[in-house]
Image (spheres, helix red, strand yellow):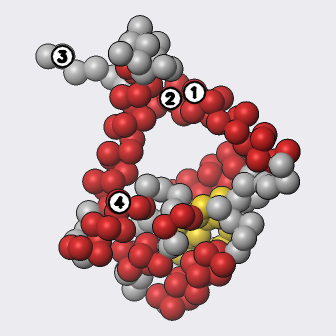
Amino acid sequence: MAAVLLPGKPVADAVFVALAPRIDALIDSGHRPGLATVLVGDDPASAGYIRMKQEKAETLGFHAPHIHLAEDASQADLVSAIRSLNDDLAVDGMLVQHPAPAQIDYEAALLEIETQKNGDSFCLLKTELRLTRQNTRYKCWMTASCFCQFRFNTGPFSTRGGGGH
């Protein structure tokens, strides 16, 4: 079987189009969705990724608070930032950017995120980490990404004639 390229941009575009009426309904009902971002350090690629997430959130009408911690921030500093976002009623989800500086236990930080505020498929990841405490973060993200790609390429958004069969 030949490899098939599954393009990501059409998937993202279709998801955002499908979400627009739901986002509008939330805003019309008085709730502006909030997506917070947290960056520890000054990695240029990470800063660019966070900037793209913030811009997309704002384009969609979201509240997009950001916490930028210094390169030498401690684990306690990061946990405090995460907990403040957990407690913020204007924040519905959060992203803690990886990679983090060497002194940060990234997996332990992820465990601090309230399940309902996970912004990057952390529910399954958190369960895995609690059970195994192994470095398994990519399994969950890949699963979510593959599911979106499969749904787009075979489901209701398919440009390949799958039509959800």
> Mark 2 vs mark 3: which is more N-terminal?
3
Q: How far from the left and from the top, in percent, is residue 54?
A: 68, 54
Q: How far from the left and from the top, in percent, is residue 6?
A: 37, 25
At mark 2, the secondary structure is helix
Name the residue furthest left: 1
Disc 2 from disc 3: Cα separation: 21 Å
Kindly identify the residue that appears in the image at 76 percent across and 47 percent down.
26
Q: In this view, does 48 lie to the left or right of 89?
A: left
> Mark 4 vs mark 3: which is more N-terminal?
3
Q: Mark 1 points at which residue?
A: 14
In the image, residue 140 sits, relative to residue 164, either above or below, namely below
Disc 4 from disc 1: Cα separation: 25 Å
At mark 3, the secondary structure is loop
Identify the mark at residue 2; answer none if there is no mark. Answer: 3
> Mark 4 vs mark 1: which is more N-terminal?
1
Q: Name the residue under label 2.
A: 11
Do the residues bearing badges 1 and 2 touch, measured as CB atoms within 8 Å?
yes
